[in-house]
Image: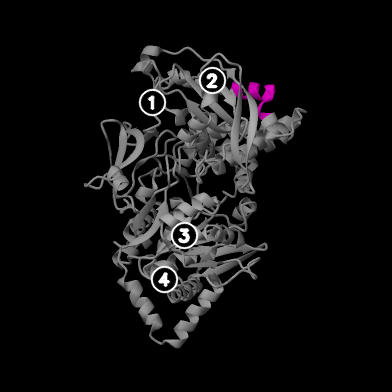
């Protein structure tokens, strides 16, 4: 019997209940690790239960009751993960918040959520909460994990995590019936109760609080573990934002259901090194990370010797030819397989080890679409990478890609127990066990998003191909038409551009225009390395972005994309006619990206409307002034005269494009 089936048969409806099972079934198996000062610290499932129980009762001693909201603010740390189960055990609702949220964003979410308690990682997060505390009438107490720098603070309503646990332990000692009452409370919690509230990334407005029941996330996690045969023997690196639905399902929910161990890296800077040490067997990352890893490899290869570059190019080309067929178990000629095995020894194996992917059995990418070329690159190395299509409102899982049915241009088939249909306007609708209960304090948006039959309007445009796999074209609101009636799907174009290591971000325009244009953000590491090798001096990102040779390089990439688009009937008319290299990097602190690094397309269009207008004129340059937020919170502005450049387009069969 699988773990997922065991969970279902035992009717374990909440994660504290699953924790009790795990502490009994896998008492001495590792549940969570953290690297601190270069040393891995490990908590077993029994240790985890002890940590959660004392903190949970300590929260109750602080006045936390059923239905209260407990905000969790910080990066991946064991005590923050313990806080989820501790809150749920007494019927409270955890509300994770992005650690890099600016004061204004943090204030909105904590106030909107009526957060009664904040569990913060360290002094930096405590300072942000204290700065806005007067705007938070519901906030009663703040608890911190790392005590460094907080000794001299006023501790009237500020508590060390350990001190709260000690309060809970003391209550257990002094009251013989306290543990039984705690266990009875866990038993009383139901699958239909709200288990967590996750805020959307807010690409089109203020973030919305998505209320997910215990059933929503429990059943979704169990189905996913069953689909990928995840067990207590798997290893996972927990490094993505706690507030992202992906981390919540993969690092918290699935680890409890399957019993596997999650490992928290020491810091973002050591993440890659820590991952090589852990060797995860199951891995998940947004496309941006896979793009960044590929960029780092390409940079290093530029600095390698001529022999190494030629060997790398030779074997990578061979991997692109047969790698996916071998991964999918298809028949491959003996000599091609032999050459691939040699490539594994010389190139693929060392490359996967550099990534920390040597032991990966299955990997997911989610959050937004990944470029087909990037997707195929990793799979050609023998990495079983799959695209996952999902949303916070679905407890992430809408579609999955079964082994042997993995295509770069689709996101798979409906996940277990999920139904999907396509509306007349092309929008994808879904319903299933993971569908959210409602948006918190937002009945109108709930009704707009989920109908009475439980169908959720995804906001994405797509269709099923003849293999029964779902294809996502773009966000429904972003898909438009050029003035000649041709389809314009900006994300499709942007993903093709981001395959090139020199391009970090791209924003395409063209709806209700005669042709397509694009903003480009260069990757400072990749282009900076290129500039150094070519003896090009620069003093800032802005100076490098405007360099004529950088424009020539970006133009060559755009023209390669245009050539590819010319051979795709549906997208051929969307070839890029003009472009510019933006004078600054798009930044979440400036409101141009969400905290999950998605482009806020409408905001960018409004902020840079002068540059867009210039692209659709005969101008060759345009002066612009942009307000920015510096790292210390100060506001300022960046002024620049941005170059505008033409790109070559290619002939295509217009009649076919119209079809």
Predominant secondary structure in magenta? helix
State how far apart marks 4 and 1 are (Cα): 49 Å
Q: Which mark, residue 136?
A: 3
State how far apart marks 2 and 3 are (Cα): 45 Å
Callout 1 secondary element: strand
* Mark found first going from the N terminus, 4 or 2: 4
Residue reaching furthest left? Answer: 453
Q: Which residue is mark 4?
A: 64
* Mark found first going from the N terminus, 1 or 2: 1
Q: Which residue is mark 2?
A: 615
* Mark found first going from the N terminus, 1 or 3: 3
Instruction: Please indicate, yes or no, whether residue 568 appears anywhere in the rendered image.
Output: yes
Residue 374 is left or right of residue 89, and the answer is right
Residue 501 is left or right of residue 408, and the answer is right
User: Which range of residues does the magenta coloring cover?
Assistant: 544-556
Residue 70 is situated, as x and y percent measured from the top left of the image, at 44, 63
**Residue 222 vertical position relative to residue 570 in the rendered view, above or below:** below
Snapshot quadrant of residue 189: bottom left
State how far apart marks 1 and 3 are (Cα): 41 Å
Q: Which mark, residue 460?
A: none
Callout 3 secondary element: loop
Residue 120 is situated, as x and y percent measured from the top left of the image, at 54, 62
* Mark found first going from the N terminus, 3 or 4: 4
Q: Nearer the viewer, residue 95 or 403?
A: 95
Callout 2 secondary element: helix
Q: Which mark, residue 480?
A: 1
Other-residue count near label 3 (Cα within 10 Å), few / some / many at <14 / 14–19 / ≥20? many
Q: Nearer the viewer, residue 591 or 145?
A: 591
């Amino acid at each position: 019997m699988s773990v997922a089936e065991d969970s279902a048969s035992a009717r374990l409806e909440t994660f504290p209940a699953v924790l009790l099972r795990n502490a009994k079934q896998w008492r001495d198996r590792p549940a969570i690790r953290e690297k601190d000062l270069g040393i891995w610290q490990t908590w077993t499932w029994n240790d985890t239960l002890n940590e959660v129980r004392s903190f949970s009762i300590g929260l109750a001693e602080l006045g936390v009751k059923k239905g209260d909201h407990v905000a969790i603010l910080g990066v991946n740390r064991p005590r923050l993960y313990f806080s989820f189960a501790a809150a749920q055990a007494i019927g409270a609702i955890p509300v994770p918040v992005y650690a890099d949220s600016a004061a204004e964003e943090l204030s909105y979410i904590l106030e909107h959520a009526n957060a009664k308690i904040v569990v913060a990682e360290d002094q930096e997060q405590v300072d942000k909460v204290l700065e806005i505390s007067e705007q938070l009438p519901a906030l009663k107490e703040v608890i911190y994990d790392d005590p460094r720098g907080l000794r001299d603070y006023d501790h009237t309503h500020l508590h060390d995590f350990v001190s709260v646990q000690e309060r809970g332990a003391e209550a257990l000692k002094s009251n013989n019936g306290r543990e039984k009452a705690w266990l009875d409370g866990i038993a009383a919690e139901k699958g239909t109760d709200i288990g967590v509230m996750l805020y959307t990334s807010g690409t089109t407005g203020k973030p919305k609080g998505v209320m997910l029941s215990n059933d929503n996330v429990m059943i979704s996690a169990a189905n996913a573990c069953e689909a990928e045969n995840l067990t207590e023997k798997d290893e996972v690196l927990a490094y993505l934002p706690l507030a992202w639905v992906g981390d919540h399902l993969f690092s918290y929910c699935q680890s409890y259901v399957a019993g596997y161990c999650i490992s928290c890296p020491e810091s973002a800077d050591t993440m890659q090194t820590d991952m090589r040490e852990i060797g995860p067997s199951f891995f998940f990352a947004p496309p941006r990370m896979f793009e960044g890893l590929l960029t780092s490899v390409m940079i290093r290869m530029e600095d390698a010797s001529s022999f190494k570059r030629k060997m790398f190019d030779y074997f990578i080309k061979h991997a692109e030819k047969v790698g996916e067929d071998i991964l999918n178990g298809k028949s491959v000629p003996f000599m091609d397989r032999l050459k691939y095995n040699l490539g594994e020894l010389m190139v693929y194996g060392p490359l996967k080890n550099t990534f920390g992917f040597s032991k990966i059995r299955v990997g997911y990418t989610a959050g937004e679409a990944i470029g087909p070329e990037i997707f195929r690159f990793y799979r050609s190395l023998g990495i079983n990478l799959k695209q996952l299509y999902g949303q916070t409102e679905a407890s992430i899982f809408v579609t999955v890609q079964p082994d042997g049915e993995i295509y770069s241009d689709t996101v798979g088939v409906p996940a277990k127990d999920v139904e999907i249909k396509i509306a007349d306007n092309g929008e994808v609708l879904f319903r299933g066990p993971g569908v959210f209960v409602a948006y918190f304090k937002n009945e109108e948006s709930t009704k707009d998003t989920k109908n009475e039959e439980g169908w959720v309007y995804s906001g994405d445009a797509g269709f099923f191909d003849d293999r029964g796999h779902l294809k996502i074209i773009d966000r429904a609101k972003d898909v438009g038409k050029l003035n000649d009636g041709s389809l314009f799907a900006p994300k499709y174009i942007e993903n093709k551009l981001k395959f090139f290591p020199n391009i970090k971000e791209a924003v395409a325009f063209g709806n209700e225009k005669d042709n397509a244009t694009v903003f480009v953000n260069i990757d400072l590491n990749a282009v900076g390395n290129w500039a150094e090798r070519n003896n090009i001096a620069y003093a800032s990102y802005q100076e490098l972005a405007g360099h004529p040779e950088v424009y020539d390089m970006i133009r060559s990439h755009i023209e390669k994309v245009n050539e590819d688009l010319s051979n795709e009937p549906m997208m051929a008319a969307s070839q890029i006619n003009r472009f510019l290299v933006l004078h600054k990097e798009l930044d979440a602190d400036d409101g141009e990206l969400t905290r999950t690094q998605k482009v806020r397309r409408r905001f960018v269009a409004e902020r840079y409307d002068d540059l867009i207008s210039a692209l659709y004129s005969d101008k060759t340059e345009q002066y612009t002034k942009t307000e920015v937020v510096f790292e210390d919170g100060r506001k300022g502005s960046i002024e620049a005269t941005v170059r505008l450049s033409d790109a070559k387009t290619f002939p295509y069969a217009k009649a076919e494009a119209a079809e």
